[in-house]
Amino acid sequence: MIGQLPGRVVVAGIIGFVVVLVALGAMSLDDVVQPGPYLLALALGLTSVVAVLLPWPPGREAWAAAGVVAAVVVLGLLVVSVLPDGRPGYALWFPAFVWIPLSGLALRGRPVAALVGTVLSAATTIGWAYLEPGVGLDDGLYRVVSPTAAVVVAVGIQRLVRQYGEEVDRAHAEQLEAARLSAGARAAEEERRSRLARIELEAAPVLRRLRDGGPVDDRLATECRLLEAALRDGIRGRHLVDPAVRETLWSARTRGVQVTLLDDSGVEPGGSPPAVADAVRRCTVELVERLERGVVTIRLAGPTEATLVAITPQAAEVAAACRAGLAAHRELDVRVEVEHHDEAADELLVTVRPAPRPTTPPPGTPAASATGRG
């Protein structure tokens, strides 16, 4: 029920209770031995309550908790030092100013500090009761039972709330993981169905011709070989194939170019595609469509790196054409390096990585000042 109340109502109730305590303390002001320590004890009680209600500065939580504990302990010492002999009734407000701030410490995640303050305060009260004539140890124990129990209950509530919070977080994480796995399974199923539909579309004409008993001539054999390579691309190079790449590879293989696609990015079906996948597909089209012969291996080594290696007598010519063609695709947020150092060499290497992010110099540095003036 209390958890359903607005925070303002709870704070207003605490303030009202504190006002009653201060009024009780003020009513006994004329009966204490010295009013100064008594008023200081009231002020410390008010300060400790306000301290546990207000937000603490980041990084100063331990100091704030230690200050509250110190205020409660000093408050007890001040009160028992000025009570009339054998008249503890004049400080009935004092136990409440012990359990309210210390319970607040426990609920704010400082149970150890709350228990330490409780032990020190109880020791102060019991020691005073034992030494004070007319009070006695039994009366002292009676007066510390209620505040100690209140703080212990607050510590227990804090532990339960923390435990329940951890269980809720764990359940939420498990729910998210289950949703992720379910989404991945659905995406994998969709990809499987899409791949099967594409295989059926591409392979159906050839399979029908074989089923009908048509002659297996060189043209049909070549078409079967190209179809097998295209199907293998969809399995081994999942993120490297799109309609443009598929068409380009089919034409290149028809000319005799050997192309191998390897997707080693480790991205599961349904996951986010590798960051460089789109750029690699563009590079594949730019490179392969210019080849008349040769061997090409395109490997997606990870989500953020890919290499295209071509062994062809046209390496120098293709390198120049690729540099010019890729320069037109500046909208791709990648860095493409075309390496062909020796004009007589047959090897061409293209590396694709994400473009480096521009770094902003810290304010006040010469580079930042120069940029600002420009």
Image (cartoon, rainbow, N blue to C red):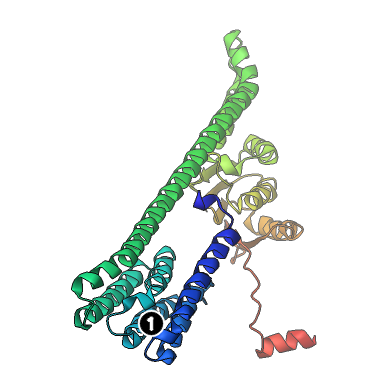
Q: Is residue 144 above or below residue 161?
A: below
Tell me if 28 is positioned left or right of 14 in this view: left
Q: Is residue 8 above or below residue 24?
A: above
Disc 1 target residue: 75
Q: Is residue 27 above or below residue 7?
A: below
Q: Estimate the x, y position of residue 176 in percent, counting from the top left.
A: 50, 44
Residue at the right extreme, as displayed? 374
Relative to the observer, which residue lies in front, 181 or 88? 88
Q: Quadrant of the C terminus?
A: bottom right
Name the amino acid type tagged 1. Answer: Leu
Q: Estimate the x, y position of residue 184 in percent, counting from the top left.
A: 52, 38
Residue at point 40%, 48% (across, down): 167
Asked if one can make out residue 242 in the rendered structure from this viewpoint, the answer is: yes
Residue at the top extreme, as displayed? 212
Relative to the observer, which residue lies in front, 186 or 9? 9
SS of the residue at dot 1?
A: helix
Relative to the observer, which residue lies in front, 168 or 127? 127
Q: Quadrant of residue 106?
A: bottom left
Asked if one can make out residue 59 in the rendered structure from this viewpoint, the answer is: no
**How many marks do you count on the picture?**
1
Relative to the observer, which residue lies in front, 343 or 289? 289
Tell me if 111 is positioned left or right of 353 in this view: left
Crowding at mark 1 (Cα within 10 Å: few <14, some 14-19, many 20+) = many
Q: Quadrant of residue 213?
A: top right
Q: Estimate the x, y position of residue 274 in percent, counting from the top left.
A: 57, 50
Q: Estimate the x, y position of residue 280 in percent, counting from the top left.
A: 62, 51
